[in-house]
Image: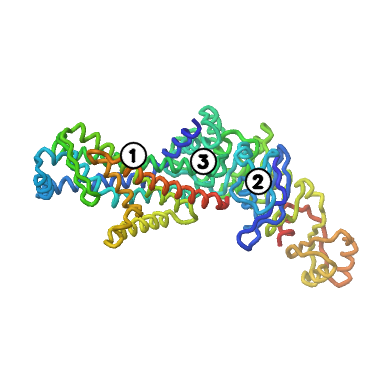
């Protein structure tokens, strides 16, 4: 109970900060741009070709669900990662920089518990953010193309292709996919969180995280690294898309999330050790 | 109630504390003095478990902070110089969040403390709108939630106006009177320390160079105020006799020297002595004497 009460306080702190909402605002703006471009140009041309070439009805499958899936798959790793790194990179380092941490550390709370509280609050932020993008994306897509229709999934890089004929099966699978994205994205948050525990500026924690992430992504896409792609963080993070397969391959999913879970745990432990060894002057 | 046992701490090669030990009894107000960098904040950091000592330990009510930090700190409230709250939250939310790290939130107790520190009408406002004095009152409120037995105050009156300083002093003295609270008070304002503290310790470069009761300061009458001409010649003579020049016209005289004989000697050197009188030594005199 005490942990939950303290977690409530952590969440209040996190969600009361104006910068926490920068990501929400950016995504709503981006979704709006996609919607406007779709409405004012021939933006659906590529999708029409893709859907019709596979023998499906474009008007039915170019739906709010399909648009939401596209928004999430294209935007989350690139744009989402910036905000996850920003928020998680701030969570300890910013409090230290602002001096708030002194007031907290003067209380009878262990550093492990404090970091656990902060880590869980960052994980909750990550989840809520992904679902916010999904819900607002769906809302805007509904305005553009109506609420119903099936879900058309095509992700050539991960070799995933699936079609959900009914709206209800499509929304369920999209929800599962969103949960998968959120779990994947926690790895970015964990990496930024680890750096946030070091004696560095919050901006440095964010920048180092993004640098690692983008280097990982670039290397992963180099042709001669292809045989080793499953060693890359960003490749493992992309495995959420397997949840969109009609027949879910649980061994692949389990392997990917076990890899990411191990990384998250390692990042947390390193961050904790760095934090535990630090002296905080009053 | 509060014991420091042979604390040593270095930052890199620079020693910050060297074998610091003292004991603060229950209900006592103990002042910790020293220049910037003397080790006062490091001492407080060690007592709060925020700084790990290289050697020694701090105990609160017999519980080692280094071994059982959470249990030891359950009885401690603290205020830092320029307390940094969550500016974007209200005073009430700050209290709620900070006190939740110690114990379940107690609305009635919080309301009582808020009223006592005089923040009743502004507690719902964002902290960013608070004046420095209001922040210090909020700092005091958070330190008192839940009601501790030991209060650690690090420069709590820094930046307050004289009215604020008096209010703060009276508040702490009343708390001690009502609850027998033990207070460790770290301040640059020597007059404040003198008025509030029962005992003081002076730190210099990480070493404790003085410890004593404030009431005993007045009994030590080795400081003399001398009005004489020429002063330079008198000062030279007095230094040769073992006196320490505190400032022009003010010296500390070793106990073995006899003041009337010194006056006679000065007159014999053709120095015109208008007055030669002992002065009551203030904490400031003592502090300057020791730390110079």
Out of B207 and A79, give the one closest to the viewer: A79
Quarter assignment of residue B184: top right
Percent of width and height locating residue B200: 72, 48
Q: Chain of mark 3?
A: A
Percent of width and height locating residue A93: 46, 51
Q: Are marks 1 and 3 in contact (CB under 8 Å)?
A: no
What is the CA distance from the residue labelled 3 to the residue labelled 2? 29 Å
Q: Residue at x 52, y 31 (%)?
A: B104
- Of the 4 image quadrants, the one containing the C terminus of chain B is bottom right
* Residue at the extreme top: B108
Out of A159 and B152, give the one closest to the viewer: A159
Under tag 3, what secondary structure? Answer: helix
Q: Which residue is mark 1?
A: A128
- Of the 4 image quadrants, the one containing the N terminus of chain B is top right
Q: Chain of mark 2?
A: B
Percent of width and height locating residue B145: 56, 35
What is the CA distance from the residue labelled 2 to the residue labelled 1? 45 Å
Under tag 2, what secondary structure? Answer: strand
Q: Residue at x 66, y 47 (%)?
A: B192
Percent of width and height locating residue B13: 63, 63
The lab-note entry on whether marks 2 and 1 share a chain reads no
Q: Is residue B105 above or below residue A199?
A: above
Q: Is residue B267 above or below residue B196?
A: below
Q: Which residue is mark 2?
A: B185
Residue B62 relative to residue A40: left or right: right
State whether residue A58 appears in this view.
Answer: no
Q: Are marks 3 and 2 in contact (CB under 8 Å)?
A: no
Q: Which residue is mark 3?
A: A113
């Amino acid at each position: 109970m005490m942990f939950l009460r303290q977690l409530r306080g952590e969440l209040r702190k996190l969600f009361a900060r104006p910068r926490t909402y920068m990501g929400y605002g950016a995504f709503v703006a981006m979704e709006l741009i996609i919607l406007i471009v779709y409405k004012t140009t021939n933006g659906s041309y590529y999708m029409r070709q893709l859907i019709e070439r596979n023998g499906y009805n474009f008007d039915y499958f170019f739906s709010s669900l399909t648009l939401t899936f596209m928004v999430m798959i294209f935007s989350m790793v690139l744009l989402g990662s910036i905000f996850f790194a920003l928020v998680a990179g701030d969570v300890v380092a910013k409090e230290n920089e602002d001096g708030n941490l002194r007031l907290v550390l003067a209380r009878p709370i262990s550093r492990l518990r404090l970091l656990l509280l902060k880590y869980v609050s960052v994980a909750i932020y990550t989840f809520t953010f992904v679902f916010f993008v999904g819900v607002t994306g769906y809302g805007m897509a509904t305005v553009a193309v109506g609420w119903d229709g099936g879900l058309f999934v095509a992700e050539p890089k991960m070799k995933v292709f699936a079609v959900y004929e009914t709206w209800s099966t499509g929304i369920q699978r999209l929800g599962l996919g969103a949960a998968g994205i959120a779990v994947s994205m926690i790895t970015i948050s964990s990496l930024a969180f680890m750096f946030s525990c070091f004696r560095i500026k919050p901006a440095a924690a964010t920048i180092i995280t993004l640098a690692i992430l983008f280097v990982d992504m670039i290397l992963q896409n180099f042709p001669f690294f292809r045989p080793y792609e499953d060693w890359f963080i960003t490749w493992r993070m992309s495995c959420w898309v397997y949840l969109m397969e009609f027949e879910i391959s649980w061994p692949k999913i389990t392997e990917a999330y076990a890899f990411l879970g191990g990384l998250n745990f390692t990042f947390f432990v390193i961050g904790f050790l760095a934090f535990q060894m630090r002296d905080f002057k009053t | 109630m509060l014991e420091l046992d042979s604390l040593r701490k270095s930052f890199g090669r620079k020693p910050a504390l060297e074998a610091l030990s003292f004991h603060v009894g229950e209900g006592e107000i103990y002042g910790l003095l020293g220049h910037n960098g003397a080790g006062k904040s490091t001492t407080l950091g060690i007592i709060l478990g925020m700084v790990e000592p290289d050697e020694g330990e701090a105990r609160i009510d017999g519980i080692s902070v280094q071994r059982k930090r959470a249990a030891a700190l359950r009885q401690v409230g603290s205020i830092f110089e320029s307390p940094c709250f969550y500016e974007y939250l209200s005073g009430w939310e700050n209290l709620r969040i900070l006190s939740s790290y110690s114990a379940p939130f107690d609305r009635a107790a919080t309301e009582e403390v808020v009223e006592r520190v005089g923040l009743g009408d502004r507690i719902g406002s964002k902290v960013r709108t608070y004046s420095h004095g209001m922040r210090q009152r909020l700092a005091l409120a958070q330190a008192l939630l839940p009601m501790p037995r030991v209060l650690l105050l690090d420069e709590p009156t820094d930046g307050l106006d004289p009215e604020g300083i008096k209010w703060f002093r009276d508040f702490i003295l009343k708390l001690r009177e009502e609850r027998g609270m033990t207070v460790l008070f770290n301040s640059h304002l020597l007059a404040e320390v003198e008025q509030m503290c029962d005992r003081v310790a002076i730190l210099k470069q990480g070493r404790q160079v003085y410890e004593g009761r404030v009431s005993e300061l007045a009994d030590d009458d080795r400081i003399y105020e001398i009005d004489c001409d020429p002063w330079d010649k008198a000062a030279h003579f007095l230094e040769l006799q073992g006196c320490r020049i505190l400032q022009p016209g003010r010296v500390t005289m070793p106990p073995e020297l006899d003041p009337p004989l010194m006056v006679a000697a000065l007159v014999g050197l053709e120095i015109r002595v208008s007055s030669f009188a002992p002065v009551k030594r203030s904490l400031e005199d003592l502090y300057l004497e020791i730390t110079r």
